[in-house]
Amino acid sequence: MPQSASTLTDSDSSPVTRVSVVPGGPVEGKMRPPGSKSLTNRALICAAFASGTSRLSGTLVSEDTEVMIESLAKIGVSIKPVDGGRTLVVEGVGGVVSDDARKISSETPVEMFIANSGTTVRFLTAALSAFGGKYRLSGIDRMHERPIGDLVDAIAPALDGSIAATSEGKCPPVDIDSKGWTGQPMRVGGGVSSQYLSGLMMAGPIASKPIRIEIVGEMVSIPYVRMTARLMESFGGVTGWEFDGDEPWSGLRCVNVEGSYQGCEFDVEPDASAASYFWAAAAISGGRVRVEGLTENATQGDVRFARVLEQMGCQYSSDENGITIQGGPLSGIDVEMGEISDTVQTLAVVALFADGPTRVRGVAHNRFKETDRIGNLAIELRKLGARVDEHDDGLTIHPLSDPARLSVGGPVVMETYNDHRMAMSFALLGLRLPGIEILNPACTRKTYPDFWADLQTLTGRSHVWTTTGATGAVAP
């Protein structure tokens, strides 16, 4: 039976688990990833603060969505799972129930634990400050190192109350004591995370007054902003845009938000970031993989990763039900990935098997995610003998000169830094290289608990699991 990462735990007091993906021939098959984390958590915010009932279909079951659901439940939002959580029925607290929901936090702040979920802490910070009440949002140690100052600084001047990020460098925990937003214009930096702007946008209809949000500097990950706007429209939110120049989106300067949320039925797409691993499996192995449920017209910008693989030499095809990648000889490329930055680690692994260097640009903000996804990624790839050059805005990955030599040098242990995308990307190494051992594979439960089982099903080969106990013994 394939083994799910959700059954494994790693900590200082627990056995250390490692997994090795077994090399083999071309990967052939099809896969439908679980629901999008980005869409699930956005839809939960809109549905939670809507008037009436929403039914969210295709939702993701993972740590990131669980902490969002648990946090919303603490202010009285009823969220009932159906079909193992892949459908959620949400009774919103908008309209007449709003006063009762706010009273929950009128005396003592509501404590919300958000683990290491960036979407949860950012979206809730904005939404709860607009809704009103007293709250404290905290997480694991790494979350308390991830900056949220730009969002807090954007909210503070327009808040009837107080808000503060209390860790060094304006990182969580976040303390909120609010009577809602005043309606004053807001200004938010665009260079660290598009989730700041998305959070403010989604909070606009919760504030029950028109909101103007000005963007300072260049906005990263614009496709996620567009995704947010399209989702808000499904629930009754209205957005208007202002740009510098005649080219839409190239110079986003302001968003105007109004409307109010109403319950609706909403279908969540499969996760395009997760799809990148399966398309990459085809690229690396010379196989053919079809990802179902995603098309070129998908809401998520990360579907463009498949086109990046096409640039490298893969064959790309799509229809109304899915996108297919056929692997082929790979060439190094120079690529701007600011709009699809969650797929940088995936591309970095593919680049190791190209015929020349690959330069990734526009992803300086990747240093502030679950881990430093530039510096720590470079450290791990160098363990393979790869040359990786770090730059201010990204990195250059040079291909492995002699992948075969890894088969005689003993295992190479890849640290994941408790970052789900590190683990899933490094899994792809094992499709070509023997002796790759990945630490803490359970970290994939953050967004994809069944990743290891799904990869095993796709390849048709069992992974090798080992656990080192306190005595140093290794068990299969």
Image (cartoon, helix red, strand yellow):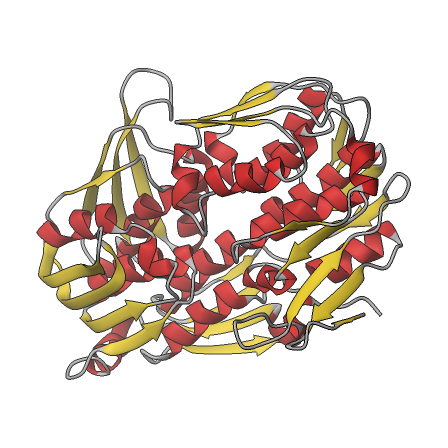
Residue at figure coordinates x 84%, y 32% from the top left: 286
**Position of residue 18 in the picture relative to residue 239 (left or right):** right
**Position of residue 42 in the picture relative to residue 388 (left or right):** left
- Residue 261 appears anywhere in the view: no
- Where is residue 165 drawn, in percent x and y? 21, 59
Front residue (pair 417, 132): 417
Front residue (pair 259, 251): 251
Residue at figure coordinates x 39%, y 62% from the top left: 45
- Where is residue 19 drawn, in percent x and y? 73, 59
- Where is residue 332 drawn, in percent x and y? 66, 19
Residue at figure coordinates x 22%, y 55% from the top left: 168
Front residue (pair 392, 447): 392
- Where is residue 434 drawn, in percent x and y? 81, 45
Q: How many marks?
A: 0
Front residue (pair 147, 20): 20
- Residue 23 appears anywhere in the view: yes
| In the rendered image, the vertical position of residue 81 relative to residue 427, given as above or below | below
**Position of residue 154 in the picture relative to residue 249 (left or right):** left
Residue 471 found in image quarter: bottom right
Which part of the image, by quadrant, shows the N terminus?
bottom right
Residue at figure coordinates x 36%, y 41% from the top left: 194
Which part of the image, by quadrant, shows the C terminus?
bottom right
| In the rendered image, the vertical position of residue 215 relative to residue 278, given as above or below | above
**Position of residue 453 in the picture relative to residue 274 (left or right):** right
